[in-house]
Amino acid sequence: MPHRDKIAFVGTGGTISMTFSSKQNGYVPTLSAQDLVEMLPADLKSDLQVIDWSHQPSSHYTIRMTTDLVELLRKLVK
């Protein structure tokens, strides 16, 4: 495989992390960042930095959480 730059996979919760719960009669966040990475083809999984940042719907984010996420992403690209 050709050289790739380092890739970070940041799990932020949201719709992609939700599955249906019959107990709660709705969709709830259940999948971690690692769970989502496991769905990728093997050649894409290598050399990933997996960060499990949040497990809630994005509509529940506060301004502080969004600021924290931006700061985390800023540090990752340095």
Image (cartoon, rainbow, N blue to C red):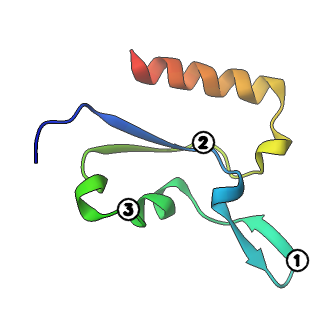
Q: Which residue is mark 2?
A: 53
User: Which quadrant of the structure image shows residue 40?
Assistant: bottom left
Q: Nearer the viewer, mark 2 or mark 3?
A: 3
Q: Which residue is depicted at the point 52% across and 25% down? A: 73
- Residue 51 image label: none
Q: Amino acid under label 1? A: Gln
Crowding at mark 3 (Cα within 10 Å: few <14, some 14-19, many 20+): few
Residue 35 at x, y = what percent? 49, 64
Residue drawn at the location 40% of the way across and 37% of the way down: 8
Q: In the displayed structure, would residue 45 be above or below residue 75?
A: below
Report x, y in % for residue 57: 78, 50
Give the residue number, with chain letter if any, for mark 3.
Answer: 40
Q: Position of residue 76 (x, y in %)?
A: 43, 24
Helix, strand or loop for disc 3 = loop
Q: Residue furthest front?
A: 2
Dot 1 corresponds to which residue?
A: 24
Task: State which tag comes first along the sequence, 2 or 3.
Answer: 3
**x and y percentages locating residue 78 in the rendered image:** 39, 14
Task: Tell me the kind of residue under disc 2.
Answer: Trp
At x 71%, y 51%, the residue is: 14
The furthest residue to the top: 78
Q: Residue furthest bottom?
A: 22
